[in-house]
Amino acid sequence: MAPPRPPRLDAAADEVARTAAAAPDWDSLAAAASGCLACPELAATRQHVVVGDVPVHGRPRLVVIGEAPGATEDQTGRPFVGKSGQLLDQLLGEAGVDRADVAVLNIVKCRPPGNRTPRIPEVTACSGWLRRQLELLGAPVVVALGLSSAKWFLGPKTVLGQVRGRPHEVDGRSVWATYHPSAAIRFGPRGAPRAALAEDLAAVAASL
């Protein structure tokens, strides 16, 4: 079965959502998303659409969702493979979770120029892809890394320090919001974000 046609240049969010919903499986969704032109600035400056990593066999134990690809991710087409990804892998391992068993995604699939924060219209346009990914993966536990990801699940007034450390029921899933690995790196190995991220990942692992 041919994948849905990728959304055209400057396509509205509902067109992206319809395209994503029409994808019957992960490979079809990835093929359609890889040609998406809904966000003109991102489409013009990206090297790759970073669709996400999923386990080769079986359902993921959990889904980890960040904000948007960085420079290394844009170059390779894979999420969390730079310094933030290395720290994420380390902390997942310390919590007893193998990254090979985890789906790793981002709210926005294309790198914003200069690693700026994704704009609201970009997040809105890309949301259809993420919703369909979550449906296809079927994982009951999600870790939202950073404020942008936390807001996607928990609402625009979310304060990360107030919602982390416990699960939140969202659309039948347990959503844990915590700090992004980039914040842990920025504040150093003894900083509060790293300690909180490690603590939260350990709690998530214990809940699986």
Image: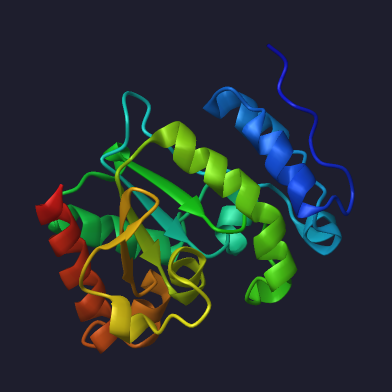
What residue is drawn where x is 39% and y is 66%? 145
Q: Position of residue 74 (x, y in %)?
A: 63, 54
Q: Position of residue 134 (x, y in %)?
A: 46, 42
Is 134 placed left or right of 119 in the picture? left
Residue lying farthest to the right in this orientation: 9
What residue is drawn where x is 35% and y is 75%? 179
- Along the line of sight, which residue is nearer the eye, 62 or 158? 158
Residue lying farthest to the top in this orientation: 1
What residue is drawn where x is 62% and y is 76%? 117
The answer, for residue 111, to whether it is visible in the render is: no
In which quadrant of the rendered view does residue 103 lie?
Answer: top left
Is 207 placed left or right of 89 in the picture? left
Is 138 placed left or right of 3 in the picture? left
Quadrant location, the N terminus = top right
Q: Position of residue 13 (x, y in %)?
A: 75, 53
The answer, for residue 203, to whether it is visible in the render is: yes
Q: Position of residue 34 (x, y in %)?
A: 70, 39
Is residue 95 positioned above or below 133 on the image? Answer: below
What residue is drawn where x is 58% and y is 22%? 24
- Along the line of sight, which residue is nearer the eye, 199 or 128? 128
